[in-house]
Amino acid sequence: MNRRAGRDGHTEWCGKDHRCNLGEHRSDEIVVDVAGRSRAVLVRVRTAAGREHAEVRVRVALAPGELAARRQLVGLLGDLRETVTRAAIAGRPRPRRAA
């Protein structure tokens, strides 16, 4: 994927509209929707400093009972921790090999 900015300063994935402000560039939203149960929205962001991030919002319907809802939340937090850790490790700069 092209990370360089075009002549107008936008990347090829940038939404090129009101979402770009204060030097930030933001992609269109990518939505995963499971009707009535859950929804996730992902936006790619490049800051004014040039650092890129994934911004993710998640909404999950909780069980009506308190104990079941708490179990869901514990599982969700554990899964999110694993996902964020895996993404952070994959995004680390690789050490250069000696020639």
Image: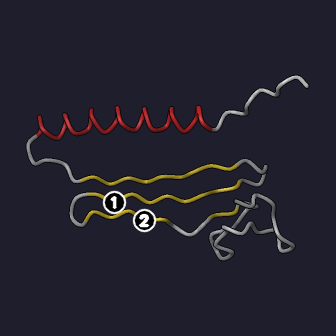
- Protein image colouring: secondary structure
x%, y% of residue 55?
A: 54, 52
Q: Residue at the far bottom: name it.
A: 17
* Position of residue 97 in the picture relative to residue 40 (left or right): right
7 to the left or right of 10: right
For residue 36, which quarter of the picture? bottom left
**As shown in the figure, which amino acid type bears the numbered disc 2?**
Val
Residue 93: mark in rendering: none
Q: Which numbered marker is on residue 31? A: 2
Name the residue located 17 percent from the left edge and 41 percent from the top edge.
69
As drawn, 50 above or below 83: below
Give neighbour class at mark 1: few <14, some 14-19, many 20+ (Cα, 10 Å).
some
Disc 1: which residue:
39
The front one of 71 and 23 is: 71
Classify mark 2: residues with Cα within 10 Å, few (<14), some (14-19) or many (20+). some
Q: CB atoms at circles 1 and 2 under 8 Å apart?
A: yes
Q: Determine whether, in the image, residue 6 is placed left or right of residue 25.
A: right
Q: Residue furthest front?
A: 99
Where residue 35 sits, quadrant-wise, is bottom left
Q: Residue at x 67, y 68 (%)?
A: 14
Q: Element type at marker 2?
A: strand
As shown in the figure, which amino acid type bears the numbered disc 1? Arg
The CA span between labels 1 and 2 is: 7 Å
Question: Residue at 64% across / 75% down in the picture?
Answer: 18
First along the sequence among labels 1 and 2: 2
Q: Position of residue 45 (x, y in %)?
A: 64, 56
* Up/down of 90 relative to 51, above or below: above
Q: Quadrant of the C terminus?
A: top right
Q: Left or right: 89 with respect to 78?
A: right
